[in-house]
Image: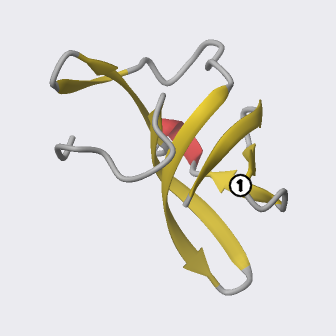
Amino acid sequence: MGGTLTQVGSEQIVLRQESGQTVSLQRLAEGATVFYEPAGSQWTRLPAQGPMPLGPACVETLMDGRNLLALKVFLGVTCGPASSA
């Protein structure tokens, strides 16, 4: 799911899709939601703690009932990453 991160909290992230729709995604406990940033032709994993930058992002999600869970967040891109992390 691609769009723009508008909020990143300890329990959820908010993504605004290109259509303007806002989607709230739950973060998995204990750093299980992983954030990556581009580093040349590779993806670098960011520390689980600390502030995350807002802006373009591609989020790999899982649907659990009616809840969307954020598994992997690729920063700086709005569509799938060129290489897997």
Residue placed farthest to the front in the image? 19
Q: Give the side of residue 28 with respect to residue 76, left or right.
A: right
Locate residue 55, reporting x and y percent: 65, 28
The residue that appears at 78% across and 60% down in the rendered structure is 23
Residue placed farthest to the bottom in the image? 65
Check disc 1: other Cα within 10 Å, few if <14, some if 14-19, many if 20+. few
In depth, the one of 24 and 41 nearer the eye is 41
Locate residue 36, reporting x and y percent: 38, 30
The residue that appears at 67% across and 87% down in the rendered structure is 65
Q: Secondary structure at mark 1?
A: loop
Check disc 1 and report the residue beneath it. Answer: 18
Q: Amino acid at mark 1?
A: Glu
The structure's colour scheme is secondary structure
Q: Quadrant of the C terminus?
A: top left
Q: Give the side of residue 43 with respect to residue 63, left or right.
A: left
Q: Give the side of residue 66 with respect to residue 83, left or right.
A: right
Q: How many marks?
A: 1
Locate residue 43, reporting x and y percent: 25, 28
The residue that appears at 74% across and 83% down in the rendered structure is 66
Residue 48 in the image: above or below residue 51: below
In depth, the one of 7 and 29 nearer the eye is 7
Q: Quadrant of the N terminus?
A: bottom right
The residue that appears at 61% across and 12% down in the rendered structure is 50
Locate residue 48, reporting x and y percent: 49, 24
